[in-house]
Structure formats: structure tokens, C-alpha cells
Amino acid sequence: MSHTFDALSQIVDPCDLLTEPEDLIPYGFDGTAALKHKATCVVTPRNVEQVQAVVRWARDEGVPIVSRGSGTGLSGGSVPVDSGIVLCLVHLDQILEVDPANLTILCEAGVITREIDEAAAPLGLFYPPDPGSMKISTIGGNVANNSGGLRGLKYGVTRDYVMGMEVILPDGEIAWLGSKCVKDVAGYSLKDLFVGSEGTLGLITKVLLKLVPRPRARQTLLASFDSMEAAARTVSEIIKRQIIPCTLEFLDRKTCQCVEDFAQVGLPTEAAAVVLMETDGVPSVVEDEADAMEAIASENGAISVERAEDDAHAARLATARRTAFSALARIRPTTILEDVTVPRSRLVEIVSFVEEVAKKYDLEMATFGHFGDGNVHPTILTDETDQAEMERVEHALSDIFDKTIELGGTITGEHGVGLAKKPFLPRQFDTASYRLLSLVKKSIDPEGLLNPGKIFDREEPASA
């Protein structure tokens, strides 16, 4: 593809065009375990005009484009699988405007997620979405995957904060979708179509986000239980009493043991389940809700309830959940972090089923996740070089996805479909709705050049 390199070198600076095999290695995979491909070349434009020029060139040449941010995805969404180019947007990293009058912030796609909240904080404002990768993930990637996080129960996910975006369409044209208006029902909600589209419909270059007033107080509690059922009852009772914490997370025994060994935060490793509870808002309400949650946990058989005495103590308790993946990843060479969501009333069933599947296929597994919104992360500790074990892993995941659907759930709550979940998507959708997905893709990207092979298999261009 020497002609590719020559043409692209006329669009971006030489330092922003990677073609040497050793430079391309990091762009052949993302955060997804056991998914590795080879990138042909990588372009890292410095402005929107360069992005446009690359997209127009790719359209004219029929060259596929895979858009990419920090590469933290967990479904293989930014992994190149077809002969083409990786378009990495990390250099579009400016916060362009913070508007306290309209409670909005305008960012380029390459801005790191945590930096958005840090920019809002001095004005007393808050950007709530907090994916586990927020220290390194980009907002463009968050929007492309509709990322969630620990605060999703109370504050929602990325989609709930996207008011507008700038998108480069497959023909290189720029479209602005949305506005600063709180109410806007002019035509179809096109911005919502692009949220969660995983780079298959267009390249997101700017994002307009909603901010909210920063909570004045927060209280953190950690409750341990001798059964997952007792933990689930506690969560159900908290919701039933119309308390909506900002965080309501759980870890099973295996996760607790690994986290304690890793972070040494004082977790009760004998507990069958640990629940992290956080409430925020007006100080008096926070105090009342914390008292109520502590009482509810005790009423439902909590072995212990630890309540944060100060911010440092709260941070230590929260570490128990935020380090779960890192702690588990130390155990075996390969860590497969899965992502399913079920109705909250079916949480105990899916967690119990995961334990049964681990025994059935003789696999080392742990489970943690967002108890408050039904999002569970079954985590398989394995070795991708062991072919026999990886075959058992595939069977285990298939069983878990089927059970999730049977319980009225979804195969992905926040990681996206990408490559990893693509084979399972038709199981969740009926024929008409699955066909509608394909029609949307064909209508916006008829040549199939944007992130081909993700969500569903690549088809021949519509004109063929």
C-alpha cells in the first residue's frame, strides 16, 4: 500500500503517519483479551480539516477506516480487521468551551474523560459519567460506545449527557447534531443514533456535554454479607425505599480476595459478597440516606457495615471496587472481562448461573459489577495460549449470554458489540430489529468503509 502512504503524507505531517511494523503493533489490539490484528498504517491528524481530508481520500480510494482513541475498549471495536487505515484522534485534545450559563462543556474527541470533570469542578459543576478507564479513555470513545460507570444508577450513562456533536460522515462532510437547547425535537434525534455506534456511522470530532451542579456532600459505606442473596435483598430494599445512591456496587468472594491481596484495603475476605454504597447531594439528605442504607444492610443480615469517616477513608473504600479488574488481572496471563445486564430482580440468578458455568467448564471466574443497575461483569481468568481452555471459555460465554437473554437482559450494558459480541447479537434481536440495524448502516455508509466488520459482518457495497 505504498500509494496509501504517499497520499496520506500529503495530508498530515510525517510524524503523524506511522507505517513501520514495530510502530503499528500497539494499534493492532485494544483492551479486549485475545483479540489481536495487524494495522496497515496509522494516521493521527491534528485538526478536523485533516480528518476530513483523510476520510475523503479513503472514500475515493475505497480504503476502510477504523477510528480510535486511547484503545481502552473491551469489545474489539477499535481493532483493525480489514485492509485499511487506523485513524487515531488523540491529538484532538482541546476543551474548547465551558459554559456555566448553559451548563455545558464543548470538547474535542481526544480529551481524556477525567479532564472534563476536572475542568468543570472550579465552577462548581460536575460531569458524572465515570467509566473504569476514565483516567485514560477519550470522550470520543466514550460517546462511540455509550460508556457507563459506577455512578450510572443515579446519574445515567454517557448518552444522558450528550447534547450535541460534530461528526465527519463517510463522504467527508461535516454534520453538527444537536444543540445547547434543553428542549429540541426538530426532526429525528440523530445525535442519539451516533451515540453507541462504535465508529460504524461516522467519526466523532467534537462533543457538547451537559454538566450538572456539583454535589455538596458524599458519604460512602461498605457492607459485607455471607450470601449474595442477602446482598441483593439489601439493594432491592434500598431502591424500594426510594433511595437512589450514586453508587451501588458489588464484589463476590473471589474478587474480594484478589482485591485485598492487591490493594490491602481491609476487605472481609470471608464474605460471600461486598456492597459499596455511596450517596451524594445536599448534606442533610446525604446523612439521612447513609443512615437508612446502613440500617437496611443490617436488617438484611450484613456481617459488617463500614462507614467512611472522611474523604481519605471514602477513597480507600471505593478502591475496593475501582481496583477489581487490576487485582484480578494479576492471577492468570489472560483476563476476559465480560459485560451483561439483567433486570435488577434477576441479579442473583445471573450471578449464581455464572458460578455454575465456572464449575461446569472448570474455569477460574470472579464476578463484580453494578448491582444498582443490573450490570454484571463475569471475569474469566485464563490463558489465551491454552487452546483447550479457550474453547471451554467460548462455551461458557455462550451459555452466559443465552441465560442473560432468557432473563430479559442484554449481552452488553456498556462495553459495546464490536468484534467480541458480534456473533451473539442476533440471539438478542428479532429478525426485524436486526435488519433495521443493517439498514441504518447501509443508508449512512453504503460503501461499508467505516469500521467494517464491527457489530455485524461486512457486506458488499450497496451498489454492488
Image (cartoon, rainbow, N blue to C red):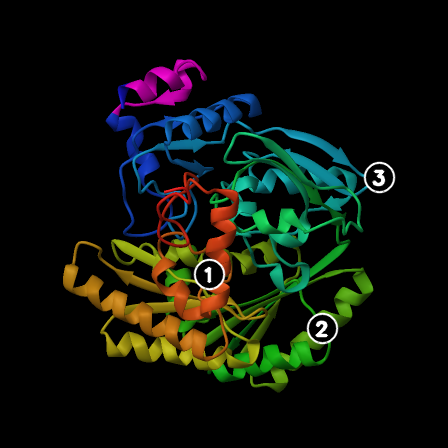
Q: Assess whether mark 3 and mark 2 are in contact (beta carbons under 8 angstroms).
A: no
- Label 1 sits on what residue type? Arg
Residue beneath disc 3: 101
* Along the line of sight, the residue nearer the viewer: 422 or 360: 422
Is residue 12 covered in magenta? yes
Question: Helix, strand or loop at disc 2?
Answer: loop
Horizontally, is 2 left or right of 415 in the view? left
Question: In the rendered structure, which amino acid carries the disc numbered 2?
Answer: Ile
* Amino acid bearing label 3: Ala
Can residue 322 be seen here? The reply is yes
Near mark 1 (Cα within 10 A), the count class, few <14, some 14-19 or many ≥20, is few
Q: Which mark is residue 243?
A: 2
Which is more N-terminal, label 1 or label 3? 3
Q: Earlier in the sequence, mark 1 or mark 2?
A: 2
Q: Which residues are magenta?
A: 3-20
Q: From the viewer's perspective, is the residue at label 2 or at label 3 nearer?
A: 3
- Residue 435 is marked as 1
Instruction: Quadrant for residue 152, please give it.
Output: bottom right
Task: Report the residue at 64% width, 48% height from top.
Answer: 190
Instruction: Report the mark closest to the observer, 3 or 1.
Output: 1
Q: Nearer the viewer, residue 176 or 299?
A: 176
